[in-house]
Amino acid sequence: MMDESDDDKPLAQLQKEKEGDADSDNDLTLADMLKKIKSDRATKKKKVPKKKGAAMPEAASKRTKTSNSATSTAGLPSGALEKQAIVEGILRRWTYCLPDWPDTSQIGGPPKGFVECGFPGLYIGVENDTLGEVIDRRDKENGCPPIQSTLLKLPTKELQSYLRYGIEKQIAHLEENKADHATSVYRETRAALLKESKQARAYNATKIDKEYKKSVNFVK
């Protein structure tokens, strides 16, 4: 855009000045031109003010979640934690530890339009009028279903015997299939199972049951 002072200048002089400005741009190196472009773009960007109440940084959020989970078991008697550890040990190998469940003799076959869904007593619909529907006929009130809340209700001595029995069966199964494993894997697995078996024998069932009852009242 022309200034008022340009009105007094001859047309030829104005033309020369315009050509001179173009020549000055041509003299710039590629690097200088890139810097100029970036500088021009930066001046066009407007600063966006930060909103109040910004989200908590991820690291702080993780620390908060960790502290919350840690306090969930804080103050619980050691016996309560030991009973939970026994149940977790059973659930990791429940097919070795627990009696057969569910009782298939009490379930019967799948209803019409349903097929077994990878577990006795659990069926899924495969026909138009039953497609996707699930029927669960497993008895969760009787027997020993592999459910944490159900197992925690059992006496610790009974749970202890289930755990030891399951570990013994695992060791026997490992010995039978020793040839299928590398020597180092076999030794490490066997040593870990023997260590768990020793710990399972060391639990004081009477003390654990007494302290677990306290923990139930503590949680309430």
Image (cartoon, rainbow, N blue to C red):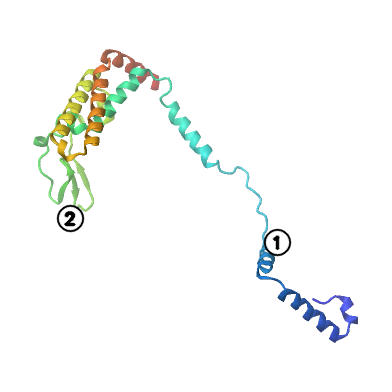
The residue positioned 18% from the left and 45% from the top of the image is 118
Q: Position of residue 22 (x, y in %)?
A: 74, 78
Q: Give the mark toward the camera: 2 or 1.
A: 1
Q: Residues within 10 Å of mark 2 (few under 14, many from 20)?
A: few
The amino acid sitting under disc 1 is Thr
| Residue 82 location, quadrant | top left
Instruction: Locate the N terminus by quadrant.
Output: bottom right
Q: Earlier in the sequence, mark 2 or mark 1?
A: 1
Residue labelled with disc 2: 127
| Residue 11 location, quadrant | bottom right
Assign a secondary structure to mark 2.
loop
Cα distance in 3D space between marks 2 and 1? 66 Å
97 is higher (above) or lower (below) than 114 = above
Residue labelled with disc 1: 43
The residue positioned 43% from the left and 23% from the top of the image is 74
Q: Residues within 10 Å of mark 1 (few under 14, many from 20)?
A: few
Q: Position of residue 161 (x, y in %)?
A: 19, 21
Assign a secondary structure to mark 1.
helix
In the image, is 185 to the left or to the right of 104? right
184 and 168: which one is in front?
A: 184
Q: Position of residue 41 (x, y in %)?
A: 67, 64
